[in-house]
Image (cartoon, rainbow, N blue to C red):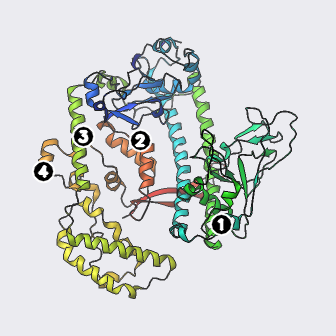
């Protein structure tokens, strides 16, 4: 097994402890917390300026550098997608011509224990450059075989990520549906008269004997649940500690189907976390830090209560019940919890939500089982591949970049004047776009009046639509007033840019609740939404109305920066899609510009874009037919899709 002779980078002195002019810039500055979130590193939690690099306060690692956490949490990994810097806890490695960088990443991932064993013993484990150089790695002589191994492991990771994403979207679907169904109840918080004790007359607490530090081996063995069994807000029976041999079980509060478990003692962020139990268990004891809430199923649905106690808004009320001495964990007493005021929507509405949760939970269980199988498959393939026992002959790598070409094009460490200039141009262009976004001078007094009145009308219509009592006659006067203002604004709106018009389309969404012929009488209540654009043929310059002199100076801004919302509109309007579809197209279009798909950042954008009355995206269930591999009988499944709200 030859030793790798890498080019080592990283180990830079932290600039954050020094002058302010060196941080909050445009260059990613990675710390261990940024690693192990995906193969290619996304946006860093911290950034530094071009000035820090230009003055040699930090060293720029080239694209495709494998970075390793080398102090403390040894073995956290990532690959730089563009030039970037790291702090002193990370070492960057450039592989030589013998080893393909992605193969090296996967080899390190499979051999993290080897990295940890090579670390020097200290207060904090340290994997220094000498220790890294001493590590012997095993790799095929043929670099194409290395690429084939990297490709098949990468495909496994993509499948795993897709499955995780599907699970996340199902959870988000239920959370957003809960808010949509019971949002009106939350608006009446000052009117809540029901207390938890009215629907859950008692609470039981468990018992905590002395235990082992490891989980039980079988269901026949007694064990005590750990707090972490509920802190994820879904019950996880694997989070337990085995009881000592011959332990006398003096109190056995065992979770059963339908139980509601509540974390009464935890950190402030996690105290009050609640989990619903979907199955029966045996020999598994609740500790004294977990409550079992005994609710009356005739007065409240347990699923509704589960989602209520975990709701992002309501859970703050729950956490506010906690108290504790300085230095101790916050604790919620039974008396305070039972005295908590809660909303009390109709049982029929609660039961409807519960039915949806059960349906989605069945689908989620299938996804979780599939995820476990994929993770096991990845582990097996990884071991076989690195021991030279994987048949690589049928793996096509013609679509992978030529490694030697990539090496030749890679810049040396340090930053060139051209790169600094490019970064500065990008910053200036982002500033121009930001100015366009905050500029409201295009709105006249009349246009602002139209917008305000549309919002008022929208709230009224939505409120009535939820009760099923829309009476168009009651809105005639308001509609006519709005129609008259809209008529005067048509020429003005005709001068707006596509971006300016898109900002206000959502105020007219209530029109879809009216009969189809309503626009015959009021043709000017949709002056924004009547403007439909062909985003596919539009440039970002056109979208924002970038002046010609700016385009002349910089060229098209679309060649240098990416606007995520415009990207969605340009490539995914009028169709359903998944985050995987976005990832594939995004990387294909923008990767060579020095940008890349960042899963966590994109997921955050998607979830935020589905919130509120001005939501930009929505989720749908799409049925698709697949063939069962065993029976060969076609079956229909549902998958979560995204769609742009027009």
User: In front: 283, or 456?
Assistant: 456
Q: Nearer the viewer, mark 3 or mark 2?
A: 3
Residue 480 in sight here: yes
Q: Nearer the viewer, mark 1 or mark 2?
A: 1
Q: Which residue is mark 1?
A: 195
User: In front: 321, or 153?
Assistant: 321
- Using a 10 Å C-alpha cutoff, classify the residue at mark 3 as few (fewer than 14 neighbours), some (14 to 19) or many (20 or more): some
Q: Secondary structure at mark 4?
A: helix
Q: Secondary structure at mark 2?
A: loop
Q: Residue at x 31, y 75 (%)?
A: 453
Q: Secondary structure at mark 1?
A: loop
Q: Quadrant of the C terminus?
A: bottom left
Mark 3 and mark 2 lie on one chain; the one further toward the N terminus is 3
User: In which image quadrant can residue 24 be found?
Assistant: top left
Q: Nearer the viewer, mark 3 or mark 1?
A: 1
> What is the spatial separation of the Cα atoms under label 4 and label 3, in whole angstroms?
19 Å
Q: Nearer the viewer, mark 1 or mark 4?
A: 1
Mark 3 and mark 1 lie on one chain; the one further toward the N terminus is 1
In percent of width and height, residue 306 lies at 64, 58
Checking the image for residue 427, the label placed there is 3
Checking the image for residue 548, the label placed there is 4
Q: Which residue is mark 2?
A: 598
> What is the spatial separation of the Cα atoms under label 3 and label 1, in whole angstroms?
54 Å
In percent of width and height, residue 526 lies at 29, 74
Q: Are marks 4 and 3 in contact (CB under 8 Å)?
A: no
> What is the spatial separation of the Cα atoms under label 3 and label 2, in whole angstroms?
19 Å
């Amino acid at each position: 097994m030859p030793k790798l002779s890498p080019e080592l980078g990283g180990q830079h002195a932290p600039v954050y402890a020094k002058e302010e002019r060196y941080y909050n810039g445009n260059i990613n500055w990675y710390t261990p917390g940024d690693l192990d979130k995906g193969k290619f590193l996304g946006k860093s939690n911290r950034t530094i300026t071009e000035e820090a690099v230009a003055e040699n306060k930090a060293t720029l690692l080239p694209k495709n550098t494998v970075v390793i956490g080398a102090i403390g949490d040894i073995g956290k990994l990532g690959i730089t997608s563009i030039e970037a810097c790291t702090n002193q806890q990370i070492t960057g490695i450039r592989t030589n011509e013998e080893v393909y960088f992605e193969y090296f990443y996967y080899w390190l991932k499979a051999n993290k224990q080897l990295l940890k064993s090579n670390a020097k013993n200290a207060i904090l484990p340290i994997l220094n450059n000498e220790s890294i150089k001493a590590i012997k790695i095993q790799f095929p002589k043929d670099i194409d075989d290395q690429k084939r191994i990297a490709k098949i492991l990468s495909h496994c990771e993509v499948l795993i990520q897709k499955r995780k994403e599907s699970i996340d979207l199902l959870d988000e679907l239920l959370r957003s549906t809960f808010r949509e169904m019971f949002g009106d109840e939350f608006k009446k918080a000052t009117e809540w008269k029901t207390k938890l004790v009215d629907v859950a007359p008692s609470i039981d607490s468990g018992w905590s004997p002395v235990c082992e530090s490891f989980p039980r081996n079988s269901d026949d063995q007694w064990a005590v649940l750990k707090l972490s069994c509920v802190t994820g807000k879904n019950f996880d029976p694997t989070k337990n500690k085995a009881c000592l041999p011959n332990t006398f079980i003096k109190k056995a509060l065992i979770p059963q189907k339908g139980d509601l478990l509540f974390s009464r003692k935890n950190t402030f962020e996690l105290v009050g976390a609640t989990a619903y139990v979907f199955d029966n268990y045996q020999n598994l004891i609740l500790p004294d830090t977990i409550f079992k809430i005994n609710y009356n199923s005739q007065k409240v649905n347990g699923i509704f209560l589960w989602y209520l106690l975990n709701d992002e808004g309501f859970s703050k009320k729950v956490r506010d019940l906690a108290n504790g001495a300085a230095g101790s964990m916050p604790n919620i007493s039974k008396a305070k919890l039972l005295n908590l005021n809660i909303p009390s929507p109709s049982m029929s509405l609660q039961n409807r939500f519960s039915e949806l949760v059960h349906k989605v939970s069945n689908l989620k269980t299938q996804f979780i089982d599939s995820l476990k199988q994929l993770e096991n498959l990845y582990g097996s393939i990884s071991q076989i591949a690195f021991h030279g026992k994987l048949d690589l002959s049928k793996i096509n790598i013609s679509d992978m970049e030529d490694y030697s070409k990539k090496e030749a094009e890679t810049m040396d460490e340090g930053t060139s004047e051209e790169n600094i200039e490019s970064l500065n141009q990008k910053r200036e262009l982002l500033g121009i776009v930001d100015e366009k976004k905050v500029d409201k001078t295009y709105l006249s007094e009349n246009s602002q009046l139209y917008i305000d009145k549309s919002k008022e009308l929208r709230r009224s219509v939505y409120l009535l639509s939820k009760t099923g009592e829309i009476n168009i006659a009651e809105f005639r006067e308001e509609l006519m007033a709005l129609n008259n203002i809209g008529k005067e604004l048509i020429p003005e709106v005709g001068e707006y840019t596509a971006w300016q018009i898109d900002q206000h389309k959502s105020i007219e969404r209530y029109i879809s609740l009216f009969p189809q012929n309503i626009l015959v009488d009021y043709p000017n209540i949709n002056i924004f939404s009547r403007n439909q654009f062909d985003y596919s043929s539009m440039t970002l310059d056109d979208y924002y109305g970038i002046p010609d002199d700016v385009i002349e100076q910089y060229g098209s801004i679309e060649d240098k920066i990416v606007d995520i919302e415009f990207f969605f509109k340009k490539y995914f309007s009028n169709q359903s899609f998944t985050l995987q579809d976005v990832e594939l197209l995004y990387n294909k279009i923008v990767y060579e510009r020095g940008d890349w798909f960042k899963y966590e950042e994109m997921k955050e954008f998607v979830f935020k874009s589905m919130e509120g009355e001005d939501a930009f995206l929505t989720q749908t269930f799409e049925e698709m037919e697949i063939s069962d591999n065993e029976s060969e009988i076609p079956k229909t499944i549902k998958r979560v899709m995204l769609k742009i709200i027009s």
